[in-house]
Image: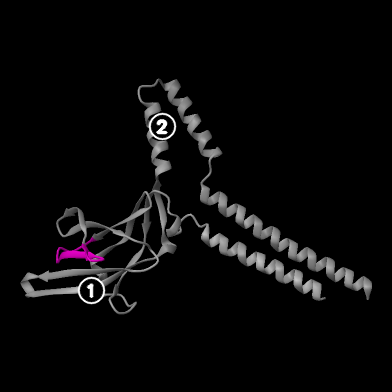
Amino acid sequence: MQRLQNVSKSLTIMLLIALIFLGIANPTSAAGLADGEYSVTYSVLKADSDSASMADGYFNKPAKLIVKNGVITAQIGLNTSAITEFKVNGKPVTVVSKNGESSTVQFQINNLNNPSSGEIHVIVADQNYDHWYTIRISFDENTIKTLSTSDTAEKQSSNNSDQTGTTSENVTTTTAGTEKNTVENPQTGDSDSLTLYGALAVLSGSIVLIVFIQNKKRRVVE
């Protein structure tokens, strides 16, 4: 009986390790984002609590993350011109585009695990309102979705180059090659997940099998 318990404990530990590894290996984990573009949901929080700031409504969702050489740049949209100044981690944001009341700004962030500290200067001239707010921008890592990666862009560029100036026969050949590559090169994240889930299934089956064998042996001895 003691031996059975030891075996069960060992396999349980192995299962826990596999589950932890599954979380770490998630391709959308902030620590392992490949170069590319991603969307992510975020919240604008008060400076001293996790409650939503009144300024949260001024920000469009979701945000875009641009990862290049391991550096994460966040792009977020504003739907008001009342925010005349905007700083993140003490540095002014860069205005990417502006259209009437709306604008898109970007800034670098060290990581997604902790909220980024920000300051906004709100001015409403016709109401004689002029105030600075301290906010925190919190990104939800669980909502990260891949928009494009450097590999995707390279393949698209290569395909476009191959198709330029070719005959219809060559275009057909290129398309067939592209479809073949798509089949032979599944997404890394999907492959890793299948491998891990397969390992979990094997470990679970092992526990059931060992428990069954040990119980059978015990009945024979008795």
Q: Quadrant of residue 145?
A: bottom left
Q: Quadrant of residue 217?
A: bottom right
Relative to 184, is 205 on the left or the right? right
Residue at 61% x, 56% y: name it. Answer: 196
- The residue lying at 52 percent from left, 60 percent from top is 24
86 in the magenta segment: yes
Locate residue 194, reporting x and y percent: 60, 53
In magenta stretch: residue 185 = no
Q: The residue tagged with tag 1: helix, strand or loop?
A: strand
Does residue 31 lie above or below 219 as drawn? above
Q: Are marks 1 and 2 in contact (CB under 8 Å)?
A: no
- Sequence-first tag of 1 and 2: 1
First to last magenta residue range: 78-91
The image quadrant where one finds the C terminus is bottom right
**Of 222 and 1, the residue lying toward us:** 1
Instruction: Please give the residue where the numbered disc 2 appears in the rendered image.
Output: 159
Residue on which the image places disc 1:
134
